[in-house]
Amino acid sequence: MIRINVTIEVESEVRGQIVALLSEMSELSRQEKGCIGYEILENNRLDNVLMIIETWENEALLAIHKESEHFTRIIPRVRELASEMRSEKFTDMASVGEAIVNRRSVKHFLPEKICVETIERLLRAAMYAPSVKDRRPWEFFVIEDEKHIHELVTTLPDGAALKTAPVAVLVCCNTRKAGLDGGNWPQELAACVQNLILQAYGEKLGSTWVGIYPQMHRVHQVKTLFHLSSEFVPFAVVAIGKSADEHVPVPERYDPVKIHFITR
């Protein structure tokens, strides 16, 4: 599997033209053989930044894509209009099965910063978790400053891994979105966090899931620490960064004794 992340910087006067071109590019590319995904993203913090995230089955099908009529017509025009256009190619992205089996909680992180584009890809994966009635009650607070991360460490007894993490993501439930019958939100947010940490593994990053809810004294402490309004319930915080730990082979966990078939 091949992932290509393209970052495009645009001026406001040509932004509409570029968005229209990329929308056409995305629609046509998705119809091609071998295209697993082709998404156009807008940066919610930087109005002048757009992103293409495309995933292909293999190099041969990607090469055919680059010879297509819409690629040779649209991409050169986007380059002309854009202030800057740069891409990253990942040819060894982890498969879902590999990420599930090999992901492990990281205790120590390297001090390298994580770019905004990478953080947004992690949170995009998180937001694709299943949700009852498509309510999607999750909210994310990205914490990068050492002061607040240190305060989290002192607040959460199980948060030692946060000490060296360059980024921490606080995952909260917005109870207004969960609805009056929203008793399933803990399961929804757990799936959301699982998506996030699996995507982190695929991006060659380490992560550690530190629980908050349902320990209500911790919920209250974190709400107070970040001055969160009443509708937010802190669920978990995820430490993210490049792992400084040595990789340890994962022992086999499959146990057929735990599987029970109910037959007619």
Image (tube, rainbow, N blue to C red):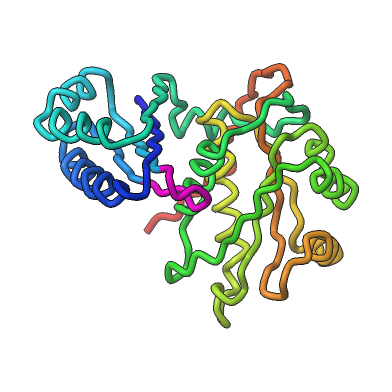
Question: Residue at coordinates 77% horizontally, 30% vertically from top-left?
Answer: 107
Q: Quadrant of the C terminus?
A: bottom left
Main SS class of the magenta portion in the image: loop
* Residue 60 lies in the magenta-colored region: no
Name above or below for residue 79 compared with residue 30.
Answer: above
Side of 2 where 164 appears, left or right: right
Residue 112 image-quadrant placement = top right
Q: Quadrant of residue 198?
A: top right
| Left or right position of 198 against 264 | right
The image shows residue 3, relative to residue 44, as above or below, that is above
Q: Kindly give the residue lying farthest to the bottom in the view shown.
A: 180
* Percent of width and height locating residue 240: 66, 37
Nearer to the camera, 205 or 10: 10
**Residue sitting nearer the eye, 62 or 67:** 67
Percent position of residue 183, x then y: 60, 73
The image shows residue 16 at horizontal and vertical percentages of 28, 52
Q: Quadrant of the N terminus?
A: top left
Magenta stretch bounds: 41-49
